[in-house]
Amino acid sequence: MKAAPVPVLPSMCDVRQRFDSPRVDDLTTTVQQQMQRLNLTEHIQTGQSVAVTAGSRGIANIPIILHETVQHLKSLGAKPFIVPAMGSHGGGTVKGQLEVLHGLGITEDSVGVPIRATMDTVIVAETDSGIPVHFDRFAHEADHVLIVGRVKPHTRFVGPIESGLHKMMLIGLGKHEGAKIYHQAILSASFPEIINAVATKVLQECSVIGGLAILENAVDETALIEGVRPQDFGTREPELLKQAVNWLPTLPFDRTDLLIIDRIGKNISGAGMDANIVGRKFNDHIASSDDVANCHRIMIRSLTEETHGNGTGIGMAEFTTQHCVDQLDMVKTRVNCITAIHPEAAMIPITFPTDAEAVEAALQTIGMTPPEDSRIIQITDTLHLTRTRVSAAFFPLVEQSDTLEFIGEPYGFPVDNNGLLSDVPH
């Protein structure tokens, strides 16, 4: 029997995208100005404690932003401290959540205040429909709570409020127990209904004195920082979400046969990869009419170090490598996915020993298109899309584009003799 012929893989070329990318240049001054907008002297008395939230996402400049936030609170005579606000991330353990923060550069030395981590919660109220409202015990014991978080589209849920200040109050400070209950409740009520019901109780019962909303541009830089008063959370966050959507990065082309992602992780997106960008927001394995991107197949090569083995989102891909699977901490991954009522996100894709074998297999599933003519896009991750790698089928479209340009000359498909694919250069 003759051996099957080795597929001829297409030539590739590096491509640079140009995005409209407003940026905050003076972080220190901006944070101080926005904190002053909150008029916290009306609420804080000398010596009072303030719990400040820190989440699990890889937010640009977050150690600096948190440092300047607590410096302002100290200048008012307050005693601020940091609380991890990340639901079930880090395996739903104190140790795991501290590791996540440290991996993001958030330490007691970097922010200049203590970090108080617990998975214990206090039930502070019930919604009108009987949902218990959980709140981080240390945050509840503080005199005040300040919510710091990034506003952006959620990877699964749709509404006027998605990921941002409200989600930090509910899912983040609800810890594992709260996150589990709210995600379960979403199966019987809508995401906006749960957000509104629980947020109302949190704002009534938990002495939230304000929020610091962070928006990022398409190249993973801080684009906007805004102080938001608690009474304005419900009206201002939807407006900020619209702006965040406008600043989202995109793949260089909407339709592709195979999207290769060098790395996924919780520091990149709640779903490991941003489903808004790869076109998997409404269905894990097929683009809907509401998705911008349409990736017929997705292959994942590895996890980020910062995700500490949490491979949430790997199940949204069809192909992966043994190297990536070996990086998985299945306890952390399944805790997170079960809590989020998204067990599919933890499912292991078809796994191959090498990148080359995974790519060759994926291209057997795209239809009648010969591998050498396939439309392939390779990206570092869904946060970093300025520089990508595209196959020859896209070359004419790059030449016609006003926002794309080639970096260097085309080259053969970049796998070595061991079948290892090179990363997209930064």
Image (cartoon, rainbow, N blue to C red):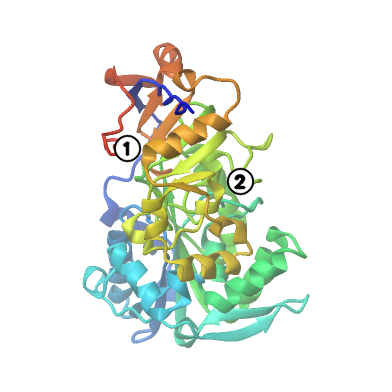
Is any part of residue 37 visible from this angle? Answer: yes
* Residue 73 % position (x, y): 33, 73
Residue beneath the point at 36% across and 64% down: 308
Residue type indicated by callout 1: Gly
Is any part of residue 85 visible from this angle? Answer: no
Task: Check disc 2: other Cα within 10 Å, few if <14, some if 14-19, many if 20+.
Answer: many
Residue beneath the point at 34% across and 78% down: 80
Q: Which residue is at the front of the view, 391 or 319?
A: 319
Q: Quadrant of residue 194?
A: bottom right
Asked whether, in this view, residue 362 is left or right of residue 129, the answer is left
* Residue 356 % position (x, y): 38, 36
Label 1 residue SS: loop
Residue that badge 2 annotates: 281
Residue type indicated by callout 2: Lys
Asked whether, in this view, residue 283 is left or right of residue 154, the answer is right
Numbered mark located on residue 419 in the image = 1
Count the marks: how many? Answer: 2
Asked whether, in this view, residue 95 is left or right of residue 416, the answer is right
Numbered mark located on residue 148 in the image = none
Q: Quadrant of residue 303?
A: bottom left
Q: Please tell me whether residue 267 is drawn above or below residue 415 in the rendered image.
A: below
Task: Please state, as top left, top right, bottom left or bottom right, where the C terminus lies in the image.
Answer: top left
Label 2 residue SS: loop
Residue beneath the point at 59% across and 43% down: 280
Residue beneath the point at 58% across and 78% down: 177
Q: Please tell me whether residue 113 is drawn above or below residue 346 in the rendered image.
A: below
